[in-house]
Image: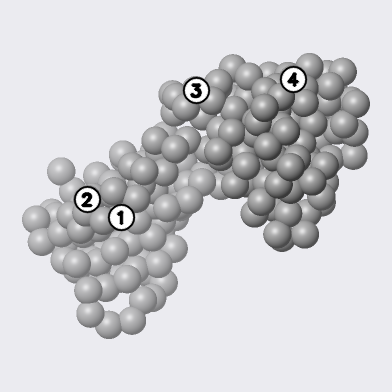
Amino acid sequence: MYIIVIGGGRLGYYLLKALLNEGHEVLVLEKDSRICRTITDELGSVCFRGDGCEASTLAEVGTGRAGMLVAVTGDDEDNLVACQVAKHKHNVPRTVARLRNPQNAILFKKLGVDVTISTTDIILEAIEREVPTHPLTQLMSIDEKGLVIVDVKITPESTTVGKKVKELSLPKESKLALIIPNKGNAHVPAANTVLQAGDQIIAVTSPETKGALQVALRGV
């Protein structure tokens, strides 16, 4: 796949190397001539000096045949513009944008960016996975469907311990996919499955109903 990376900083550099190692055709667009020269000296003709926000620059590097554009500059606005130009001017099927401010994620999605990646969110999710008593951890986003996969922990203090799944008031958008008990094998929950302390429940829900799902599974 031909992949264009906007931004040749540290993140763009390591992303470029990883994608090249996987056999992709990759080109980095970088405005800083010094950075571009360093990349070229080490990896060959894989860096083009130019502004990835400009339609003419993207046209010059053949963005119309790219399968993906990944914008990883340190400026959220530049990343958004690059993704929009790639998608709407050059019909790139998939765009990915780095976010410095996770609060911009909703705006980026509304404006057509396919995937947003926030370093802050990634670090928070890693912390949540390492805290055994943390009530809910988001494991994965399914952006195309507007859904997330979450892990909800049932503690001894949860008022739902001893209740059957059919007795829970789950949000309409939520589905329980798997229960991982403290002891025993993981299994798909049924209507008569009884929640036990120590259960980890893997569920699919919408971002807006994560809180309601947590309350339904753990109680107030």
Element under disc 4: loop
Q: Position of residue 86 (x, y in %)?
A: 78, 27
CA gap between label 2 and label 4 equals: 43 Å
Looking at numbered disc 1 in the image, what kind of residue is underneath it?
Answer: Arg
| Among the two numbered marks 3 and 1 on one chain, the one whose residue lies closer to the N terminus | 3
Q: Nearer the viewer, residue 3 or 148?
A: 3
Does the CB distance between marks 1 and 2 fall below 8 Å? yes
Q: Nearer the viewer, residue 56 or 174?
A: 56
Residue tagged 3: 104
Q: Nearer the viewer, residue 5 or 84?
A: 5
Looking at numbered disc 3 in the image, what kind of residue is underneath it?
Answer: Asn
Element under disc 2: loop
Q: Which of the labelled discs sits on residue 134, or is there none? A: 2
| Among the two numbered marks 1 and 2 on one chain, the one whose residue lies closer to the N terminus | 1
Element under disc 1: helix
Residue tagged 1: 129
Q: Which of the labelled discs sits on residue 51, or is there none? A: 4
Instruction: Name the mark nearer the viewer: 1 or 2.
Output: 1
Q: Residue at x 77, y 59 (%)?
A: 23
